[in-house]
Amino acid sequence: LKASLFFQTLFFFLSVLYADVEGEVGTHHFVSQAMNWTDAQTHCRKYYIDLSSVNGQKDTEKILKAAAGQKILKWNIAWIGLYRDPTNATRWKWSGGGYVTYTNWDIGQPDNYFNQESRGSIFSSGQWNDAKENVTLPFFCIKISVMNYEKKTWEEALEHCREEHSDLISIASETDRLLAQTEMQCYDLTEPVWIGLRFLADQWLWVDGETMVYKAWPQGGDKDHQCPTWRRCGALTVEGLWGNYNCEEKRYFLCLVNRKYSSHKMN
Ligand SMILES: [Ca+2]
């Protein structure tokens, strides 16, 4: 049975290996109440995890979808977690952590109008504009994972997430990693938790089909992850880095937020 599960998993990985997937995690939530950027950030950090980050076209579609069907007539522009690096005005960062790598500025933006625009917003077209921090706008918050306080093996954890119409989380950027680490800190954990990382067919893969491009293995020391014999499943450590462990060990685990959770949160 164990062997067949392994081949099922292997087949799953290989079948999606070439799918065109961008590395975005998380569920976005539209908050229609207008606030300035800093108050919006505080609100998101209290009720979700942070202001939304946007890491690609797929993320943009998810954001726009989150605002569709809201009970407001029309939204034109809303805050996301973009802010100008205070130490270098030409660089942008995400509220959740990390520098902006993917950009989707509107034509002529960011224009830093009157040298006063240090925060970033998104138009309903999906394109970005820099704006003044004290402008009040609706906004988008992001939440990425749900902690499961039941210890399971890696396979059992994957199965559990999928039964909930979710998946073990994949982390494809520095911003995603920092968001996941922030969430872990909220849960006050002292040991690594399973994430959707698996060593199969001689490489580390994410359960969403992504090959591992962004890496956060600990520097120096143990290099067992390079060619693991037994420890072929990935966990997020308390330090917010990848660790490779024996898949049969029972650990807490992080599933992606699914719709069911989102609707609870909104009510
Ligand atoms: Ca502007």
Image (cartoon, grey):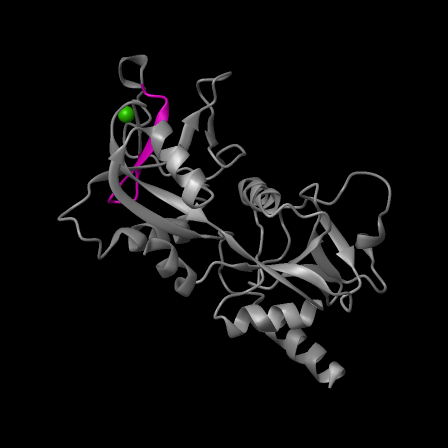
Measured as percent of width and height from the top left, residue 9 is found at 65, 74
Q: Nearer the viewer, residue 113 or 142?
A: 142
Relative to residue 164, is residue 23 depicted above or below? Answer: above
Q: Quadrant of residue 90?
A: top left
- In the rendered image, the residue lying farthest to the top is 114
**Region rendered in magenta:** 117-128
Q: In which quarter of the image is residue 81?
A: top left
Relative to residue 127, is residue 256 depicted above or below? Answer: below
Q: Which quadrant is the N terminus positioned in? A: bottom right
Relative to residue 229, is residue 107 depicted above or below? Answer: above
Image mark count: 0
Measured as percent of width and height from the top left, residue 235 is found at 70, 55
Asked whether 187 falls inside the magenta stretch, the response is no
Q: Which quadrant is the C terminus positioned in? A: bottom left
| Ligand 1 shown in quarter | top left
Left or right of residue 57: residue 235: right
The residue positioned 42% from the left and 61% from the top of the image is 261
Q: Nearer the viewer, residue 148 or 115?
A: 148
**Residue 49 appearing in the image:** yes
**Residue 53 appearing in the image:** no
Measured as percent of width and height from the top left, residue 246 is found at 80, 63
Asked whether 125 falls inside the magenta stretch, the response is yes
The residue positioned 41% from the left and 37% from the top of the image is 103
The residue positioned 54% from the left and 40% from the top of the image is 175
